[in-house]
Amino acid sequence: MQNENLEEFLATLSSIHAYDNESAFTQFLGCLSNYLPVQYATIWQYNPVADTVSVMERTDHQVDENLKVEFVHDVKNSLISKILDDIEDGENVPFLHYPSVLDSKIQHLHLSKERARRLQLTDLIAIPFHNYHKEEDFFYTYGVINIYTDEYRVFNASISKIIGEKLSELMSAYYVIKRKRITDKILRIFEEQIPNGTSAKELVCQIISEVCVPLIRVEACSIWEWDAYSNSYFKIGESQPLGLQQTFGKPINDVLGRGLTGQVAKLNKPLIIKNLQAAEEVKKSGIRSNSFQELWEGGETTAHTPQSFLAVPVKNPAGKQTDKPIAVMRFVNKISRKGTFIDYFDEDDVEFVNEIARLLALHEEQARLEMGRSAFALQFGHEAKAPAVGIRGTSQRLQRLVMETPVNTKPVIRMLQDIESFADLIMSFSDTLTFGLGDPNQPKHSKYNPRQHDLRKIIDSSKKVVIPLCRGENIHFDNISIVGSYPSLHIDSKAWTQVFYNLFTNAIKYRNKNDGNEFRVIVKSAGTSVVGYQRSELPIVDKTDLQKSPSLIQLECDVIEVSDYGIGIPPEYADEIFEEGFRAPGVSAFEVRGSGIGLPIVKRILADFHCKIHVASFGGPTTFQIFVPTILQSRQYLSTSDWKPLSNTSK
């Protein structure tokens, strides 16, 4: 390939992104066909659970519904089996070359000889690709792209590596975005239907119809709900080939431990059966049944004979892992990406359905709590997508960088640091959920792990965590200034990182966007002050260390101020902003999404460490003052009853 053609090829390849559908794989193959000597190409995805492969995309080929083997087939005794074995033996080589496939010793493994002869296919170049979201093994072979060519020398190690890496990036991004689409669709349904008084069963049926069937690609799906009174699971909704049906009339149920659904609930873990018609496959999965008819009693209606099957228990997020599921989701006959062939479920499908199950379980739990936290689900989707998009963007930049030679290590290190920042953001959001939704009566010694920490370092850490949010909003995180000297305190670092993380994210969300996107935050150590505490608030130190009054205890406190120049806070809501679920009236006009749990979390954590927070000024700037008792600078306050279990074991 000439240099100018290579540059154009690389530029076109780099411009392909897996945004919200599978057209990126069509564009990818189109790019290869336009710039490289491609006779024919197929992207095969490997399913290690069923030991099968299926076509993700293919160049210019009509689907013949009579030729399933060309689109989905077992790996055993196939050409793909040979390729995967050779990849493993070659220790993840960038490509494999099989000359004159139909005239070679492996021609008997080719399952589409007639097509290969008709198209006069010659040499085969097989390039493995990976899915980088698979944490367990970076080199997990996710699939193979088979390229037939009559000029095999063009596909050298460099070109093949570029093709494999780009396809790996597209596959990884596609996975993240598909998961995001599932979350967004479910949250949209919650957001639109809950205010209308839609029943829980109607919501479930809508999610089955609009999310499960089209995005998981199945012929039928149903959900079975636990009924403690009868010790059974009742089918409450089902999608069918002729449209959605909500189950009415005679109830269909499986007793716990009996029937297919009852046994899945008893196993209490996701279950994949490759072929329901194969008794050995059913037995191997741990399901007991004398016949298919017995197994499928009350089962879903499908266009084809029921074959591939996936069931996932829906677990109560507030319960134990060993608790029986609150529901079971069933999926029948996965459909191939090309044609309408029966495909087979894999671990990706389990992860996608687990995401659906988690959101359904959270919704169910929210309804039980009666605390008006429905906005939390919306916030979850909004907050979770930013890190995913950032990780995708960083992956793409890394990909483009790999294509350039020589590689400058400084940008690589910088981008890897960005990835770490995104991970910190995800973990910090997870900590928000832990501290925000945890049991407020949980003993402090089991909730926190106090150690001596430099408060300045904790504030710096919180600032770094919000870097991805700042970049996503196109604002400068260096506009968060930290001024003055700060004490060393005996506190829990994760909890206190959450304090400043929530204050910073509030400043980002509620900045004055009409003022040139102005954004400034100043954290300042503002000296000391004597603060009054009720005796009930302070079981923390020896009384001789306190200036006492009959009803009030005076404590010397360090004062930390956090100021921002955002839209401000109406003074009449100075106390209410610290109440769970509260959002000031009119704040929606600023297009800010939130759940009203950030400041309550801040206040709860600070109160657990006997600190106080209040609003000192309400705009120009808005200033929060945090009062930190100086006794937190020693371990003495940890010797009281609420900390004693921890102080006996920590050093």
Image (cartoon, grey):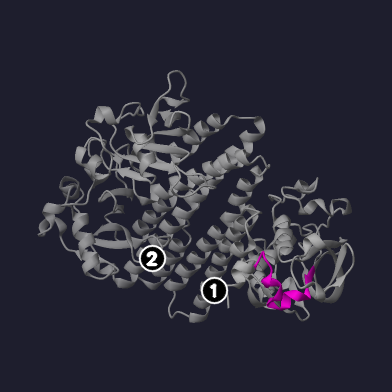
Q: What residue is drawn where x is 60% and y is 39%? A: 368
Above/below status of 476 relative to 265: below
The residue beneath circle 1 is 417
Residue 139: x and y, percent? 34, 66
Q: Is residue 569 left or right of residue 361?
A: right
Kind of residue indicated by mark 1: Gln
Q: What residue is drawn where x is 61% and y is 38%? A: 367
Above/below status of 350 relative to 288: below
Residue closest to the far top = 249
Q: What residue is drawn where x is 54% and y is 29%? A: 202
Q: Nearer the viewer, residue 145 or 6?
A: 145
Quarter-of-image position of residue 344: top left
Q: Is residue 481 left or right of residue 411?
A: right
Residue 420: x and y, percent? 53, 70
On whether residue 93 falls in the magenta region, the answer is no
- Magenta span of residues: 627-643
Residue 471: x and y, percent? 64, 65
Q: Is residue 250 left or right of residue 363?
A: left
Q: Nearer the viewer, residue 562 or 91?
A: 562
Observer able to see residue 558:
no
Kind of residue indicated by mark 2: Glu
Q: Quadrant of the N terminus?
A: bottom left
- Is tag 2's residue or tag 1's residue first in the polypeptide sequence? 2
Residue 648: x and y, percent? 59, 72
The residue beneath circle 2 is 165
Q: Quadrant of the C terminus?
A: bottom right
On whether residue 637 falls in the magenta region, the answer is yes
For marks 2 and 1, give the one nearer the viewer: 1
How far is the residue under mark 2 from the one under mark 1? 21 Å
Dot 2 falls on a residue whose secondary structure is helix
Above/below status of 147 relative to 332: below
Q: Nearer the viewer, residue 506 or 180?
A: 506
